[in-house]
Amino acid sequence: GAVVSQHPSRVICKSGTSVKIECRSLDFQATTMFWYRQFPKKSLMLMATSNEGSKATYEQGVEKDKFLINHASLTLSTLTVTSAHPEDSSFYICSATTPEQFFGPGTRLTVL
Amino acid sequence: DAKTTQPPSMDCAEGRAANLPCNHSTISGNEYVYWYRQIHSQGPQYIIHGLKNNETNEMASLIITEDRKSSTLILPHATLRDTAVYYCIVRIYNQGGKLIFGQGTELSVKP
């Protein structure tokens, strides 16, 4: 199947700082990527749909000013968690469509 | 909300077939049934999808009932590495549509 990578795989930051997570489709181009968040023992929750060259579409309840998404090319989408707080600690996962959806390995964010 | 219902957990003996059920009674005519699995602390892995015919690939088989209101994912010879949470999702194919995850079934394969 298609390969999707994420960087970094884990990050620890201080409260109030911003963290950028990259999602890349390695062997295909993806006009649409998705960002999910997963808390321990819970299912994946869709945060937003990232479309190349246009603004992201956020799910209800997700703060667009806190979770900035940029999809500048057909192989790269970034999620920036701005002014991170401990409650933002979670497992963030991206996916890209080919049209099947393939997922990245996830990024573990810990905010101290 | 997720449009599928799955049992929260199942056990299976290593080497035996694992049969994971899924109910999707409100599925639309243009929606496919997708199965993904998530091994602990990893991203979900695509397994298989189908519309109305049974499907088989190197990982699993998918059996969809004639009325399309339910399906079963079959892992023919489960191994310890198949221990994971399995998600059944309905989605319109080829529209780049988002996947809405339910709670899935936590499959434990035991020696």
Image: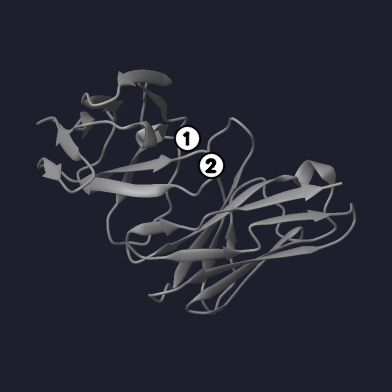
Expressed as whole percent of the image width and height from the top left, the position of residue B75 reads 23, 33
Where A33 falls versus A103 (above or below)? below
Expressed as whole percent of the image width and height from the top left, the position of residue B11 reads 36, 18
Mark 1: give few (<14), some (14-19) or many (20+) Cα within 10 Å: few
Expressed as whole percent of the image width and height from the top left, the position of residue A45 reads 56, 43
- Residue located farthest toward the front when viewing the structure as drawn: B111
Give the residue type at disc 1: Asp
Q: Are marks 1 and 2 in contact (CB under 8 Å)?
A: no
Please tell me whether mark 1 or mark 2 is closer to you in this view. Answer: 2
Q: Tell me which corner region of the image, top left, top right, bottom left or bottom right, holds residue B95.
A: bottom left
Closer to the camera, B72 or B42?
Answer: B42
The residue positioned 37% from the left and 19% from the top of the image is B10
Q: Tell me which corner region of the image, top left, top right, bottom left or bottom right, holds residue B108.
A: top left
Left or right of residue B104, residue B49 in this image: left
Expressed as whole percent of the image width and height from the top left, the position of residue A30 reads 42, 72
Q: In the rendered image, which residue does mark 2 sit on?
A: A44
In the rendered view of the protein, which quadrant contains the C terminus of chain B? top left
Chain containing the residue with disc 2: A
Numbered disc 1: secondary structure? loop
Q: In the rendered image, which residue does mark 1 sit on?
A: B1
Mark 2: give few (<14), some (14-19) or many (20+) Cα within 10 Å: many
Tell how many labels.
Answer: 2
Numbered disc 2: secondary structure? loop
The residue positioned 67% from the left and 45% from the top of the image is A61
Q: Which mark is residue A105?
A: none
